[in-house]
Image (cartoon, helix red, strand yellow):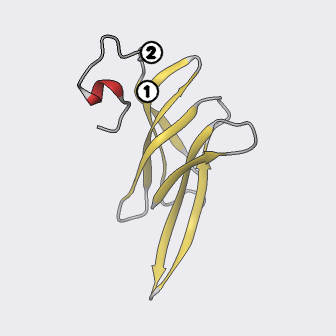
């Protein structure tokens, strides 16, 4: 499985785009795909995705908008769910604020960045 980010439609927030790629012999093909972007106005980015041996898929990602502090959420699907559909999700960490400046300046790069440390 792989993921990216993209808009679900014109003017919509960024969502998590995902693909399940399978191999038959020497040929690879997209078995299923989707964009997880519920109609809630929340932007989703910096995702991570995994699949277990029976085909269940789960992804984690950062989520925020103008009224929702950045937090960490998850969404996924069971192998028995309809293809291309994410059927469950929730919040792992609810954001409690934002970093609006680096004042005083910090030499700690983790204090200046979101989530890639």
Instruction: Give the label, 1 or 2, closer to the camera.
Output: 2
**Residue 100 has which mark?**
2
In x, y percent, where is residue 34?
60, 55
In x, y percent, where is residue 41?
65, 29
Name the residue that disc number 1 marks: 71
* Residue located at (50% from left, 31% from top): 63
Q: Nearer the viewer, residue 19 or 116?
A: 116
Mark 2 burial class by Cα count in 10 Å: few <14, some 14-19, many 20+ = few
* Residue located at (68% from left, 45% from top): 8
* Residue located at (52% from left, 52% from top): 4
Q: Nearer the viewer, residue 107 or 39?
A: 107
Q: Is residue 45 above or below residue 68?
A: below
Tell me: 57 left or right of 14: left
Q: Is residue 57 above or below residue 90?
A: below
In x, y percent, where is residue 110?
28, 29
In x, y percent, where is residue 57?
44, 54
- Looking at the image, which residue sits at the far bottom? 25
Numbered disc 1: secondary structure: strand
* Residue located at (56% from left, 70% from top): 30
């Amino acid at each position: 499985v792989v993921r990216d980010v993209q808009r679900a439609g014109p003017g919509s927030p960024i969502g998590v785009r995902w693909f399940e790629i399978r191999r038959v012999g020497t040929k690879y093909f997209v078995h299923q795909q989707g964009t997880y972007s519920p109609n809630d106005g929340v932007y989703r980015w910096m995702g991570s995705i995994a699949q277990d041996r029976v085909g269940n898929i789960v992804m984690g990602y950062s989520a925020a908008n103008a009224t929702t502090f950045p937090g960490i959420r998850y969404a996924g699907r069971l192998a028995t769910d309809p293809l291309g559909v994410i059927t469950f999700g929730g919040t792992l960490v609810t954001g409690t604020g934002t970093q609006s400046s680096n004042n005083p300046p910090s030499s700690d790069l983790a204090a200046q960045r979101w989530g890639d440390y």
